[in-house]
Amino acid sequence: MKKYVVFILVQLVWGTAIIAGETNNPLNELVEDYQRASPTNHPPVSVTAYLKHVGDKSLLAFKLTNLSEKPLTLRPSELPWGNRYSTTLAAVTTDGERIPNICMIADSFEVQQITIAPGTSREGDYDIEESVQLSLAPKNKDVILLWSYKVPGSFKNSQPICTGIIVIPKR
């Protein structure tokens, strides 16, 4: 049932984005990733997120857990909170008004890698305002924030993704 609700929400948002006729739309990117992902290609990780406020900042508090039987080796920038492009974010009000994203350059030239042992987790925060202009969201409406994380690595089939939805209450 949960997957069905997510699918319907994504389709609703995607339809809104098409009508808007925008180019470089993060909603389109999120939907394309979701449609490319194989339903039988289960990610080797679990990624969860919740909304966290620190001062005036809205953060996504992520937890990534290695579900595989092998160690997971990646660069810190490839973690869901690693850099601005490690996770795709798209936001829309409950009545379908899209909240604009910010286009920034976030190059990473890391050579260092980290290893996450099987069954262990890492946690980190992602500043939502680095990707989504929440300051432009109407103050009297809840905001639905959709996130998508492409699991780094080489896979037989399509690259697995982890997705989620967070509701940012009206201010």
Image: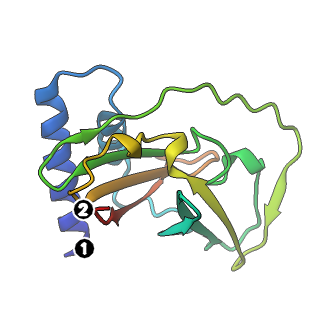
Figure check: 148 above or below 2: above
Q: Nearer the viewer, residue 89 or 56?
A: 56
Q: Amino acid at mark 2?
A: Val
In the picture, measured across the screen, residue 75 lies left or right of residue 28, that is right
Instruction: Report the residue that reaches farthest toward the right.
Output: 112
User: Which residue in the protein does label 1 denote?
Assistant: 2
Q: Position of residue 131 (x, y in %)?
A: 49, 40
Locate the N terminus by quadrant.
Answer: bottom left
Secondary element under disc 2, as helix, strand or loop, is helix
What residue appears at the point 65 percent right and 43 percent down from the top-left corner? 83
Q: Residue at x 21, y 51 (%)?
A: 93
- Left/right placement of residue 89 relative to residue 87 reads left
Q: Quadrant of residue 23?
A: top left
Toward which corner of the image does residue 154 lie, by quadrant? top right
**Other-residue count near label 2 (Cα within 10 Å), few / some / many at <14 / 14–19 / ≥20:** some
| Label 2, label 1: how far apart the Cα atoms are | 6 Å
Q: Which image quarter holds the C terminus?
A: bottom left
- Left or right of 51: which side holds 125? right
Count of marks overlaid on the render: 2
- Rendered image quadrant of residue 112: top right
Residue 126: which disc? none
The location of residue 37, given as percent across then percent down, is 38, 49
Number of other residues with Cα within 10 Å of mark 1, as a class: few under 14, some 14 to 19, many 20 or more: few
* Residue that label 2 marks: 6
Q: Nearer the viewer, residue 14 or 37?
A: 14
Q: Position of residue 72 (x, y in %)?
A: 73, 61
